[in-house]
Amino acid sequence: MKKLGYILVVIFWLVASCAVAQPDDASWLNVTVQTDNYGGESSWEIINSDSNTVAVSPPLANNTLTNIMVFLPAGEYAFIMYDSFGDGICCSFGQGFFGITNTCGLEEFNYEFAEAIDTIPFVLEPCLPVLPGCMNEAADNYNPWANQDDGSCEIIECDSLETQVSMQLTLDTWPGETGFNIVNLSNGQLYEQVIPGEFDFGDQLVTYTYDFCVALGFELVLIDQFGDGLNGSASGGQDGGCIITACDSVIWELEDLAFTEFGGTTEYSGPIFTEPCPPAPDVIGCMDDDYVDYNPDATVQDTCMTLHTWGCTNPEAMNYDSLATISDNTSPCSIQIVLEDDAGDGWGMSGIGMKQGDQQWLFTIGPGIFSESWDIMLDSDEEVDIYYFQDGGQQSSAQELAFQTLHNSVYAINQAGDTLLSEGSNPFLNNGQGALQPFSAPEWKVYHFTPYCGDSCIPYVYGCTDETACNYNADANTNSECNYPVQYYDCNNSCVNDYDGDSVCDELEVVGCQDPTAFNYNAAATDAGECIPIIFGCTDPTQFNYDSTANTENGSCIPYIYGCTDPNAFNYDSDANTDNDSCIEIVEGCTDAQAVNYDPLANTAIESCYYSAGCAVGDIYYLPNGCFEWVISVDPYCCDNSWDSTCSTLYDYCEDGWDGPLTVDDLREGKISFYPNPTSDIVNIAANSTVDAVVYNSSGKKVLDVTNVNMLDLSKYSNGIYYVRVSYNEFIINHKIVKN
């Protein structure tokens, strides 16, 4: 009996953005359309409750019945049928109709569509498609994707005198030329027969498996219409082959691929004799995989000794359990299924089916989508079956994950990022012509993978475990060096507290004067404070001119100089700035003990001294009235009588200025003058020539002695009364000067 392949026949015609899987709240919808003679005028679409198009029809042919499966989430929809000519599809030019159904009871049809548009509102409930097939895993034609058993299971059971034989026939590049007969030698019964032409182009390089029971033996006849057998490479193709096995051993193999029939020779095996397979020896052992001593090859149960201890068995793990005998896997496990289409033209009528236990999923992507992914939860302790399905064309066997679309690929990735499944483009091409070839497994099976997401072992992850640290690692379980922020700063070196936003932490703010011209300017200030202006002065409190309001020393300090500070006092000290109560009252009088009117109590000389009359011409004598006299002639009487009133009157001349050459007569007329008087600095001497002068202060101390001058500079002397003695030619003139 020929083992038939199983395929889910589903047509996907989705909008460009469509990508579907099998969630719990979704359903398959079957769209049925029978077109009239003008199928090109007809089209349909499905819109959701938001008026968005979720599915559209393919181009429709004339007088054609199409059944299109659309996968949609549960919800409210509207199916809209269009006829561009406006006469519908039911009546005048063919008997067309349309409708929608699913396996959960939805059924809506219109057999009288004779308009431009018709709308069928409907509510889609969650519903899985009914997939009939053999659900007995022991059957040769078991269909793991079926969810409804259709009674088609074929179980080969040979009696004790028979042997189960399996023939695996791999067709070459030209399968339509090949046929065969298998005949029972004991009774001539035909076990299996394929007439040349029964295999079609789609069977290129496909391997078919045929199982049957024989008691004695059988005869195999292989036929090739072209006459080259399964030797496809001889004519530019690829070779086929044939292998027959029994009792787990190869009992016959086609060695010469070139054989002929119809004008040549037919290659056949001749009689192939078989014997019943010897019974397999009993294997005694523990048949319970919960025990350490479990023997997967055991056929007879023996005592199981040691139960498995679940835990981490990796000695390099953080939680290594030396007593554990088996690693406990993480379950449930999050698996990401990724479908890709490098060309972006969609998978068309192809898709991926997955099944684990009672759970099943369908995945496909539509045009315009290059990659789509879905996250599903799987049991890590149970294998997952994964299938490729495609609509159209007879599938000859269950296929492993080998795609018949060049650009399609699928990946299964666990939550740790490990790739558990990676299958890409179909490598089987047709003689370099680009036609993709079908692929069939050498036996009934599907692709399997285990959704492993890790176990209970925890690896050492070194890092900082302190949440307050800048380099805190949330994934770390073993502490290593931690880095902390500087006080008042965070890990980004930004202030934790910065009220004014000046990038200076509030705790580090310095309030001060920021004016560089101010007395209290603070170069380190970050916040403005009160500024004090600079006040220059003497800041030394031990100095005479100490200024309590000054804040900046300017070098003006004057030391205390104690003395008499009264300019009217006899001992006035112009250098003194601090009075020490030493002032002596001025007592004016003649202080010359040689004078006739000498006053011993006087301390301040005045021009009041007078002397006994001299007898030398030119002698100067002072009179009590402030005038002065010169002896201009010798008068014995006056010499003898010491300037009595008569003599005084006779020689009494006052000190008014005079002009002209200085002669004795000029002197009598006072023709020499001093100006200005009083003065602040300079005293000019009005005379016909320079003079010699001696200046005395009020204490009689000589302070200046100059020659050949016509002026006196008193600027550096203190204010007060000064006496000047001028030598002019052979004359001497005394004069009082006041400086203020």
Image (spheres, helix red, strand yellow):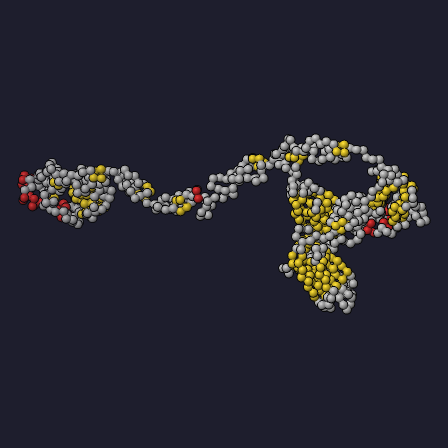
Residue 699 found in image quarter? top left
> Considering depth in this image, is 390 or 694 the residue closer to the camera?
390
> Considering depth in this image, is 619 or 370 the residue closer to the camera?
370
Left/right of residue 248 with respect to residue 464 in the rendered view:
right
**Residue visible at 55% across and 35% down?**
481
**Residue visible at 32% across and 41% down?**
553
**Residue visible at 74% across and 54% down?**
10
> Considering depth in this image, is 375 or 284 the residue closer to the camera?
284
Residue 352 shows in this picture: yes
Total numbered circles: 0
Q: Residue furthest right?
A: 263
Q: Position of residue 355 (x, y in %)?
A: 71, 46
Q: Position of residue 267 (x, y in %)?
A: 91, 44
Q: Position of residue 200 (x, y in %)?
A: 84, 52
As drawn, 648 above or below 288: below
As drawn, 74 above or below 649: below
Left/right of residue 361 with respect to residue 702 in the rendered view:
right
Q: Position of residue 152 (x, y in %)?
A: 80, 49
Left/right of residue 579 with respect to residue 631 in the rendered view:
right
Residue 688 shows in this picture: no
As drawn, 105 above or below 596: below
> Considering depth in this image, is 168 or 699 the residue closer to the camera?
168
